[in-house]
């Protein structure tokens, strides 16, 4: 973006737009960084250079390795191999203490402020100003006020954090980092929860810092922001660095193609699509950030919900399942309106739901494999005196163990000891065992290795062939495209676009998703 | 080291065996049939309430009001018999039902009103205590009929009636927790409330039931207490909630929910009973008992915590 040149007032650079990377001083570089987690390679042989006085954006799909990279720079994770060079010193790995001491600061998506303290107190929480043995509250308050005025935060420094809105908290979080004048500032999706005016304040802040020589590493999903704020951009995909570009020399279209450009490695099962009667219909559903959404799913059909993180897909399916209260709208199952006020109403109506947060909401980690599988149908499996029929329970469990190839030594094994893929199979079996006709899946393959993914794809396809109506959220485009019969793109709490199978195209989906 | 291994392997049962061996050597009066029956009789109320408390704790709740419930139910039942001239049987039934109702209210407070269980039942503790003093004007209610006394002091063959009630309740409690869907649902609610809710369980109703069950059992214990001390005392249950909590946590019931067994809780209760009885027999009074019980709790829970930490550490090492 040409406009960058006039905003940028870096004294060390006379031609700020062109020779960005060559004249700026290298401050941090990663070479050959590899990091694996059990079953997943998060980063493989990544080398990136970061320069002072530069805003360096990192983009990529979910799971591309962006957050692992941040963790390695901040010292939260130790790489398996590779080195980190910071201010000409080579490290095998960082530690959280070391990185902070050396002026590396991270602003995460989650708010890490103390809600009962004021904004100014929070700013100086880690490095208070002392006068002798006591806190110099006056000086802290004066400096905070000055800082807030300088960066035009529009927030009263004396206001308590818990009285602020979430976007305001986020800005205070950034201001806190700015007050330390870090050498490297990492921002993880800083605009995810901000509105346009606050984004402007944030961008001013970032430019100000950059002009003081800070290196800013900017993680974002919002491509349209990059031209406004980033000097260079690194594209990540599948744990690898794909390319490093100057923002002024690339386009949104090119970036998208780099982000998703893989040959679809996954194979998706062929399926005979013969959609039947309408199973699930949603009419003018609102609430929880969702505005007036209507759609229908037929028996034997897989409808994919695509969109960005935070677009409202999870909120939508939680409303349908009764996990959150809806403010208005109607839900019909088999053409009849059903009143869903609680998840158990949805279960009664024949809906199964696999939540996004597997460990927090899907699987019961401290319970055995057995009870995880039969939990929703315990009562059907019980006879006189509420006694659970263990023989039938074990029959069902063993059946699913074989059908889904659940790898567990026995049914007494606690769910926490199984791998992520096997845990997800438990959550799947828990619903399939109950034989619902409608299945809602929220990121069913997140954090699951390739082999287990294939089995889950196979099962989803098979269920659809058996006449299930399936709604599936996925942030992995190849997955949505490979499995769905129809794709609804959700953006900003609404359906931004609908695509039939012949029209499936990653660019089209992203274009709908990025409307802003 | 060998000792630690032994204790770890057997857990709380090991501690119980050690205590029995120790007191048998220390006092000749300890290992006799009569003393054994004594200990069991003394712990019967603790065990009865402990069964209900185990359900509540597994379901990730807590109820600090059980002591006050015992006081209030005792006072009210005594007043109904003495001043309202009610038949003892009906008064007892009303007393037991009162426990269930108070438990039900506790359940409503922590689910529908979303009050933290610690706070809700702390408030209930104070309220009930106040009500029991108001009801009797601070004076114990004497002059109970002899038929009531039989509940605590009668025998079937050689077994005291409270012990029979206790055995039935422990068995039924164990059955309910281990064999029925209700038991599995309580574990599910305690180990992951949101996952249980999203599996279609009526989590509020399960929690309320568990609190009402504890109230019901506390009502039964309150009647035994009333019969035993033969008067309605507004201080009868003071501190009882902490004794129960100590015993069942000692027995391996997790304070953070989702874990624990009736059998373990019962052994925990026995440890407390043996400690009280044994220390008394070797000549150490109530003050020493408090000291020792506190230390035993710290030791047992400390060993447990260390084990958890070590297994977590070894897991982390294996992952790295």
Image (cartoon, grey):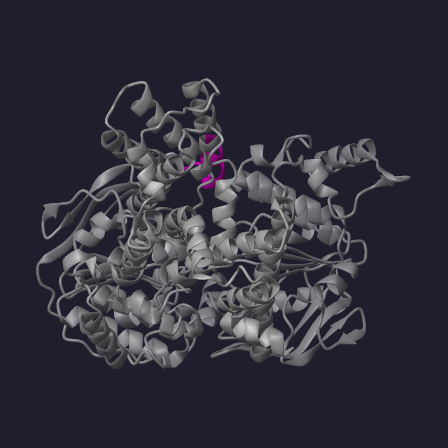
Residue A41 vertical position relative to residue B63 in the rendered view, above or below = below
User: As rendered, which of B280 and A186 lies closer to the eye?
Assistant: B280
Residue drawn where x is 63% and y is 70% of the image? A77
Left or right of A47, for residue B64: left
A265, above or below B31, in the image: below
Say if residue A345 shows up in the picture.
Answer: yes
Is A213 on the left-hand or right-hand side of A376? Answer: right
B36 or A112, which lies in front? B36
Q: Position of residue A377 (x, y in %)?
A: 21, 61
**Picture coordinates of residue B262, whole percent (x, y):** 38, 59
- From the viewer's side, name the closer residue of A127 and A309: A127
Could you tell me which residue is drawn at 16 percent across and 53 percent down?
A280
Toward which corner of the image does residue A74 lie, by quadrant?
Answer: bottom right
Quarter assignment of residue A187: bottom right
Residue at horizontal 48 percent and vertical 42 percent from the top: B241
Query: The N terminus of chain A appears in which quarter of the rendering?
Result: bottom right
SS assignment for the magenta stretch, majority: helix
Quarter of the rendering containing residue B178: bottom left
Query: Which stretch did the figure color magenta?
Result: B114-123
Residue located 13% across and 62% down the image: A299
Q: Left or right: A439 with respect to A511?
A: left
Vertical position of residue A386 compared to residue B5: above or below: above
Residue B121 colored magenta?
A: yes
Residue A193 in view, yes or no: no
């Amino acid at each position: 973006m040409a406009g960058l040149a006039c905003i940028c007032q870096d004294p060390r650079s006379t031609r700020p737009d062109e020779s960005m990377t060559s004249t700026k001083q290298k401050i941090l570089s990663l070479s050959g960084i590899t990091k694996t987690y059990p079953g997943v390679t998060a980063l493989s042989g990544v080398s990136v250079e970061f320069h002072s006085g530069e805003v360096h954006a990192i983009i990529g799909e979910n799971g591309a390795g962006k957050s692992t990279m941040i963790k390695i720079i901040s010292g939260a994770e130790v790489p398996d191999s590779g080195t980190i060079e910071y201010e000409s010193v080579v490290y095998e790995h960082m530690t959280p203490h070391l990185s902070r001491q050396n002026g590396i600061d991270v602003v995460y998506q989650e708010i890490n402020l103390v809600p009962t303290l004021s904004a100014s107190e929070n700013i100086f929480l880690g490095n208070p100003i002392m006068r002798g043995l006591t806190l110099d509250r006056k000086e802290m308050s004066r400096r905070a006020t000055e800082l807030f005025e300088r960066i035009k935060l529009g927030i009263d420094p004396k206001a308590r954090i818990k009285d602020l809105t979430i976007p305001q908290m986020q800005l205070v979080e950034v201001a806190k980092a700015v007050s330390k004048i870090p050498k490297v500032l990492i921002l993880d999706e800083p605009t995810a929860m901000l509105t346009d005016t606050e984004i402007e304040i944030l961008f001013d802040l970032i430019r100000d810092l950059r002009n003081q020589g800070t290196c800013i590493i900017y993680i974002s999903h919002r491509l349209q922001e990059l031209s406004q704020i980033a000097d260079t951009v690194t594209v990540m995909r599948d744990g690898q660095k794909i390319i490093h570009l100057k923002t002024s020399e690339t386009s949104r279209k090119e970036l998208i193609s780099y982000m998703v450009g893989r040959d679809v490695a996954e194979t998706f099962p062929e399926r005979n699509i013969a959609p039947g009667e309408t199973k699930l219909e949603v009419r003018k559903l609102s609430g929880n950030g969702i505005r007036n959404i209507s759609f229908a799913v037929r028996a034997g059909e897989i409808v994919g919900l695509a969109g960005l993180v935070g677009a409202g897909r999870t909120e939508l399916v939680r409303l349908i399942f009764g996990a959150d209260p809806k403010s208005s709208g109607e839900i019909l199952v088999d053409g009849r309106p059903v009143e869903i006020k609680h998840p158990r109403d949805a279960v009664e109506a024949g809906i199964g739901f696999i939540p996004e947060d597997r460990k927090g909401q899907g699987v019961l980690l401290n319970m055995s494999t057995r009870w995880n599988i039969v939990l929703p149908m315990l009562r059907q499996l019980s006879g006189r005196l509420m006694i659970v029929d263990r023989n039938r329970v074990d029959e069902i469990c063993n059946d699913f163990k074989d059908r889904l190839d659940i790898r567990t030594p026995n049914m007494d094994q606690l769910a926490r000891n199984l791998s992520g893929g096997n845990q997800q199979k438990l959550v799947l079996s828990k619903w399939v065992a109950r034989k619902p006709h409608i299945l809602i899946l929220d990121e069913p393959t997140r954090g699951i290795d390739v082999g287990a993914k294939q089995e889950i794809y196979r099962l989803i396809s098979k269920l659809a062939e058996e006449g299930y109506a399936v709604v599936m959220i996925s942030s992995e485009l190849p997955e949505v495209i490979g499995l769905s019969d129809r794709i609804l793109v959700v953006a900003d709490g609404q359906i931004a676009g609908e695509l039939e199978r012949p029209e499936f195209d990653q660019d089209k989906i992203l274009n709908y998703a990025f409307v802003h | 080291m060998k000792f630690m291994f032994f204790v770890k392997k057997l857990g709380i049962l090991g501690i119980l065996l050690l205590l029995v061996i120790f007191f048998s050597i220390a006092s000749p009066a300890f290992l006799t049939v009569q003393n054994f029956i004594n200990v069991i009789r003394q712990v019967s109320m603790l065990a009865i309430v402990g069964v209900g408390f185990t359900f509540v704790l597994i379901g990730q709740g807590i109820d600090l009001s059980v002591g006050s419930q015992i006081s209030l139910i005792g006072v009210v039942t005594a007043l109904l018999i003495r001043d309202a001239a009610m038949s003892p049987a009906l008064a007892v039934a009303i007393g037991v039902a009162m426990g269930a109702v108070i438990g039900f209210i506790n359940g409503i407070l922590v689910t529908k009103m979303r009050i933290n269980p610690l706070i809700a039942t702390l408030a209930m503790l104070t309220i009930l205590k106040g009500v029991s003093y108001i009801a009797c004007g601070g004076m114990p209610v004497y002059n109970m009929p002899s038929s009531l006394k039989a509940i605590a002091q009668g025998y079937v063959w050689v077994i005291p009636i409270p012990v029979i009630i206790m055995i039935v309740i422990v068995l039924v409690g164990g059955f309910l927790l281990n064999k029925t869907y209700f038991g599995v649902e309580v574990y599910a609610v305690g180990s992951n409330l949101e996952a249980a809710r999203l599996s279609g369980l009526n989590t509020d109703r399960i929690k309320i039931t568990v609190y009402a069950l504890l109230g019901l059992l506390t009502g039964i214990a309150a009647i035994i207490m009333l019969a035993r001390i033969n008067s309605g005392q507004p201080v009868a249950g003071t501190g009882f909630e902490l004794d129960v909590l100590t015993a069942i946590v000692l027995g391996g019931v997790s304070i953070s929910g989702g874990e624990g067994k009736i059998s373990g809780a019962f052994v925990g209760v026995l440890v407390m009973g043996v400690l009280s009885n044994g220390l008394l027999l070797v000549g150490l009074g109530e003050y020493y008992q408090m000291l020792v019980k506190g230390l035993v709790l710290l030791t047992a829970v400390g060993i447990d915590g260390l084990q958890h930490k070590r297994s977590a550490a070894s897991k982390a090492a294996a992952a790295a």
